[in-house]
Amino acid sequence: MPARPSILIARTVFPEVVDKLRQHFDVETTPAGTVWSAQQLVQRLQGKEGVLTTGSERIDAALLAACPQLKIAANLAVGFNNFDLDAMTAAGVLGTNAPDVLTETTADFGFALLMATARRITESEHYLRAGHWKEWSLDLFAGAEVHGSTLGILGMGRIGQAIARRGALGFGMKVIYHNRSRLPEDKEAAIGARYVDRDTLFAEADHVVLVLPYTPAVHHTVGAAEIARMKPTATLVNIARGGIVDEEALVAALRERRIAAAGLDVFEGEPRINPALLTVPNVVLTPHIASATLPTRMAMAMLAADNLIAYLTEGRALTPLNPEVVGRA
Ligand code: GLV
């Protein structure tokens, strides 16, 4: 019998996922709470043909050169900025991600974060817990209107569209968006969204939601200039990747109330948080949990596992990022 392929699960996943993978592979797991350094990851990957990564393990040219047996890295995330896809393609290593299964859950969370930010939910809860609430008053934690306001979406992929639907259909919002490519007109009409240029998006939106994929080209694409265009009553919500927003510029704007509030689920350099963010009250901070419901996280992990199984046992890729390597090995 040919030897079973060996794989590494680079972060703790649900036991059901490990059990499924063990039916096909020799599986090395990662102890709970462990995050491998780049060097440790290379050591663990010796002799492994596959790796199940989360969005944090970097698969780049240096790692690929040191792990010549590697054939596939299956990311348990829809974003894949931890992959150097060109280097992977050059090395003949397939990358896969976990799209679709998280779209609606992530859109739910984007909307929840928007509402928590606009309606000052965490800020007011902290006030209450600290025992500061002495009397009801008319303007206590008065926030911004959500229903009927203008929702600006930067990045109109699947998740952006799902957020747009919630805003337009559920909350009667006027939806404007900017994206690298414009949606077909019938799709815009079905979602109820209007394409605008970037400057108009920041200037007109009451709530700006960032849902674009992170690449070096969009590093700090939301900085002082974009924030300066926003209304003083506006909110900014980021559920994409931390590096998209210049956090220093955001903190300065929040401190000076040049915008009303921000909601951030992602951070540059996470899980480390820029300490300045912790000092401003008008920001809602959550630990990268936009897709975190148990059914969705299970579906994401199972999709990553299914990609490993399909590729290493049958040479098929389910959600390939660089399909040109399939069949090349
Ligand atoms: C989470 O951030 C993901 O990319 O799935």
Image (cartoon, grey):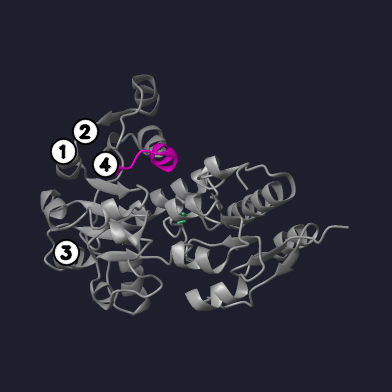
**Is the residue under label 4 in contact with that under label 3 (CB below 8 Å)?**
no
Element assignment for label 1: helix
Pinpoint residue 128: horizontal percent, then vertical percent.
34, 73
**Residue bearing the label numbered 4:** 152
Who comes first in sequence, dot 1 or dot 4? 4
Residue count near mark 4 (Cα–Cα under 10 Å), binned few <14, some 14–19, many ≥20: many
Query: Is residue 247 left or right of 64 when viewed as pictured?
Result: left
What amino acid is labelled 4 in the image?
Gly
**What's the amino acid at mark 2?**
Val
Q: Who's the residue at 78% across and 57% down the image?
A: 24
How far from the left and from the top, in percent, is residue 171? 36, 38
Q: Are marks 2 and 1 in contact (CB under 8 Å)?
A: yes
N-terminal of the two: label 4 or label 2?
4
Q: Along the polypeptide, which appears first: circle 3 or circle 4?
A: 4
**In the image, farthest residue toward the right:** 1
The magenta span reads 153-163
- Left or right: 107 in relation to 153: right
The residue at label 4 has a CB less than 8 Å from ligand 1: no
**In this image, 30 relative to 213: left or right?**
right
Which element type, helix, strand or loop, lies under badge 3?
A: helix
- Residue 196 circle label: 2
Q: CA distance from mark 4 to mark 2?
A: 9 Å
- Tell me, for residue 200, which label it has, or none: 1
Instruction: Tell me the distance, in whole angstroms, between the alpha carbons under discs 2 and 3.
Output: 24 Å
Res. 328 image quadrant: top right
Look at the numbered disc 4 and give the secondary structure of its residue.
strand
Please report contact status of discs 4 and 2: CB closer than 8 Å, yes or no. yes
Rendering coords of residue 60 (x, y %): 45, 62
The three-letter amino acid code for the residue at tag 1 is Thr
